[in-house]
Image: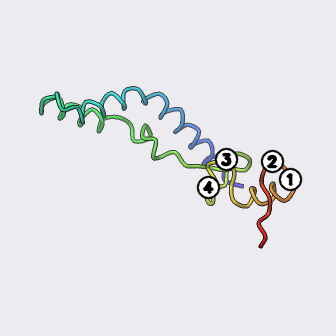
Amino acid sequence: MAKKSKIAKNEQRKVIVERYAAKRLELKKALVDPASTDEQREAARLGLQKLPRDASPVRVRGRDAIDGRPRGFLKQFGVSRVRFRDMAHRGELPGITKSSW
């Protein structure tokens, strides 16, 4: 079980990323737009730098939906490898079978 503070901080990051997503997208488009001038690109770059660090989606950590485990997270299922194995053995994941050869 992860610390409650780490889970809460990650949830707060998700909120901040969502809040600044539109502004971030607009600034990134201005950076790569071939029609923009050098001054506009510089202004867009400075605007991106002024955004909060937690507004970057890269800073959001993938965590197990049940207990918040940060390592071994399987994005497709939303759980960690440990929990995935237990759930698969109990038959809680439809279509998942144990491999054998």
Residue at horizontal 47 percent and vertical 27 percent from the top: 19
Label located before the other in sequence (4 or 1): 4
Label located before the other in sequence (4 or 3): 4
At label 1, the amino acid type is Gly
Q: Mark 4 and mark 1: span between their CA atoms?
A: 24 Å
Residue at horizontal 84 percent and vertical 49 percent from the top: 92
Q: Residues within 10 Å of mark 1 (few under 14, many from 20)?
A: few
Give the left or right position of residue 31, taking residue 8 as reference.
left
Residue at horizontal 43 percent and vertical 30 percent from the top: 21
Q: Mark 2 and mark 4: span between their CA atoms?
A: 24 Å
Label located before the other in sequence (2 or 3): 3
Kindly identify which residue carries mark 2: 94
Vertical side of 55 occupied by 73: above or below:
below
Kindly identify which residue carries mark 4: 70
Q: Secondary structure at mark 4?
A: loop
Mark 4 or mark 1, whichever is nearer to me: 1
Q: Secondary structure at mark 2?
A: loop
Q: Secondary structure at mark 1?
A: loop
Q: Mark 2 and mark 3: span between their CA atoms?
A: 15 Å
Q: Position of residue 65 (x, y in %)?
A: 70, 45
Q: Secondary structure at mark 3?
A: loop
Residue at horizontal 54 percent and vertical 37 percent from the top: 14
* Residue closest to the eye, 34 or 86: 34
Residue 91's disc is: 1
Label located before the other in sequence (2 or 4): 4
